[in-house]
Image (cartoon, rainbow, N blue to C red):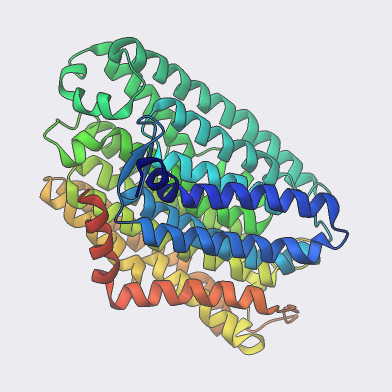
Amino acid sequence: MPQHSLEYYNLMPFIVLAAGILLTISIEMFYSKSKDLIPYVSLAVYLIVAITSVYNINNHFIVFGGMLETGGKAGFMNILFSLGAIVVTLSSIHYLEKYGTYFGEYHILVQLSVLGMMVMAGSKDLFMVFMGLELMSISFYVLVGMNRKRISANESSMKYFLLGSFATGFIVYGIALIYGIAETTNIEVIINKFNVLSANVIFVLGMFLFIIGFSFKIAAFPFHSWVPDVYQGSSTTITGLMSSIGKTAAFSVIFIMLTSIFVGDSPNLFRTYFSIISAFSMLFGSIVAISQKNIKRMLAYSSISHAGYISIGLASGNSDALAGMMFYLFAYSFMNLGAFGIISILENENEGNLEIADYAGLSKTHPFLAGLLALFLISLTGIPPLAGFFGKYYVFISAIESNLIWLVFVGILSSIISSYFYLRPIVFMYFKEYDEPIQAKISLPSIIAVSFSAFIIIIYGIFPNLLLGIIKVTLSF
């Protein structure tokens, strides 16, 4: 196969998604019944992206003059992003109808955000990182405020925009300092020269500012202040999108920039930083979540603690940590998407049924939904034999290998604390009597979405080596 044809073949996931975005825009502009068609066009596009990414996962190439990576780890991330987008799209079909806030640009913006994530995960140049980040972030800013009839959504959108722009400033300034010392924006060159460059204080400062900016994107303590209000005010399906594959995309950039630490012989200069934010994120998120009565705010603080668990791997800085974090992110994405999917089904038109107490007696009125939500919460707690347990297990093992025993103890303590607020909704669903039963209109697409998420965390909980084996193969390139 000629070189240029091979390059197009490896770029197929990006080409398919870009073509899908143009097609969706055209349908919205020229087809009067676009509302009924666009969600299913989006699903088809994501499915094709996932399939082409699976076919290309063993074809590891650097394209566009060394600016973008295809296959390997980037291909694995593309599969996760497209599958996550399928779950979000299925959950959104009924949710948008329920609120009467269908806008054609909703699915277009979700597609654009996924494209931004794919660019971030495959970036081999700092400019590509920035382009992917802005494409994802700007889409999120609009999606958060998409339900413009709700004042809380407008407020959340503005908060997210202002704080997100501030964090982007750290990233841009960090890139400037890195470029000033490395004299290149090519990440591969920076990785190869990392040992030499890390002797320069300005380079280390640039990397530190860059990592601080992305600490905001992963919602780690103390860069978490936007999370509770934004997650609560956003549409529930968008909250699921941001807290799952959106968080994964931000972590993927940190993985790329610290490649020489994970798979090379470079010292982990940021071990102390990651250890501190990991410990505080786990404890802060778990402790504050206990006092939350709104289930979306509870899961918001939960996401802060999970950012801490995943950051244990960043502090560990070895190849097992990288594989463990990728496993954790895959499992966490579907645990969160499933939990928010159930919430979106039960939520009524007036932002009702969002208090934990509202779930009293749910097992009697909607036993299937109660069972699935209990499954997701148990997995988030880290109870075996579900995928959430093995996510924590793998990052804890990597920390032990790096002699970070104290961080593992903090993680175990945080997990014990978190079991209280994760099990509390289960107690309400199964052991409390309801005053008024929840009236939920259940649609087939939303049931498929949450059932698929449940299947993922069960199958990779029972057979974790299936997923871990794929991850290790992608990391071998």
In the displayed structure, would residue 471 be above or below residue 317?
A: below
Question: Residue 379 at what x, y percent from top left?
Answer: 40, 70
349 horizontally vs 302: left or right = right
Question: Residue 236 at what x, y percent from top left?
Answer: 65, 58
Residue drawn at point x = 38 percent, y = 37 percent:
63
**Is residue 385 visible in this depiction of the protein?**
no
Most foreground residue, 423 or 446: 446
209 horizontally vs 172: left or right = left
Question: Residue 183 at what x, y percent from top left?
Answer: 31, 12
Question: Residue 342 at what x, y percent from top left?
Answer: 60, 71
In the displayed structure, would residue 358 be above or below residue 292?
A: below
Most foreground residue, 382 or 66: 66
Furthest residue toward front: 2
In the displayed structure, would residue 324 be above or below residue 315?
A: below
Furthest residue toward right: 32
Residue drawn at point x = 26 percent, y = 39 percent:
275
